[in-house]
Amino acid sequence: MTAVLHGEDVTPLGIYLLARSYHRAADTVANDHKNALPDPPARLLYLHAAETYLRCFLRTKGVTPQYLRRFNHQLGNMSDEAMALGLSTSAKVTKYLKSAAAENDYVRARYDINVRAPSCPPPKGKRSTALKVLQAVVHDLQISIEDALLKMGVVLPRTTIL
């Protein structure tokens, strides 16, 4: 029996649109001051957006879905591979992605339920500094990916529709 490889037929533009969707969902959750949700759901969405942006770039460079699976959720390794293939990002983005990978932040965002943890709800109407940094990193990564895609001739939809 052949294993199903989800996303195998998705184009780089489709992956970019998926990344934008995760990014927008993260912004929505992070900015929901009315309900004062804890940070982990927004962190997970931002981290997944970052991963998906990197996957988009790697696919435009010919990296196969089979090869991409080897990365799992290792943002630092994906970032290294993307940079080796020509992605230009700020030192802040690179440092954050490597740090997030080293600290296993992707898994921690999914399963960290310690209500006294610093990632849990700040005072109503405010967000933790860590989440604000992650927001900025993902935004910067988005811009880097868009610039790279445009240089490769990929036509992007207006981001206002997402």
Image: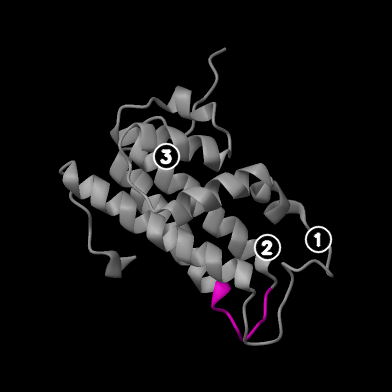
**Is 98 one of the magenta-colored residues?**
no
Q: Which residues are magenta?
A: 30-37
Q: Residues within 10 Å of mark 3 (few under 14, many from 20)?
A: many
- Percent across and percent down for residue 152 are 18, 41
Would you place residue 17 above or below residue 4 in this image? below
Residue at (67% x, 81% y) in the render = 36
Q: Looking at the rendered structure, which numbered label has been put on residue 55? A: 3
Could you tell me which residue is drawn at 52 percent across and 50 percent down?
A: 95
Query: Residue at label 2?
Result: 40
User: Is 34 part of what is drawn in magenta?
Assistant: yes
For residue 122, above or below residue 27: below
Residue at coordinates 52% horizontally, 25% vertically from top-left? 4
Q: Quadrant of the C terminus?
A: bottom left
Residue behind mark 1: 113
Q: Give the amino acid at mark 2.
A: Pro
- Residue lying at the far left of the rendered structure: 153
Based on the displayed image, in which of its 4 quarters is residue 118 positioned? bottom right
- The amino acid on which the numbered mark 3 sits, given as a three-letter code, is Arg
**Does residue 151 appear to the left or right of 10 in the view shown?**
left
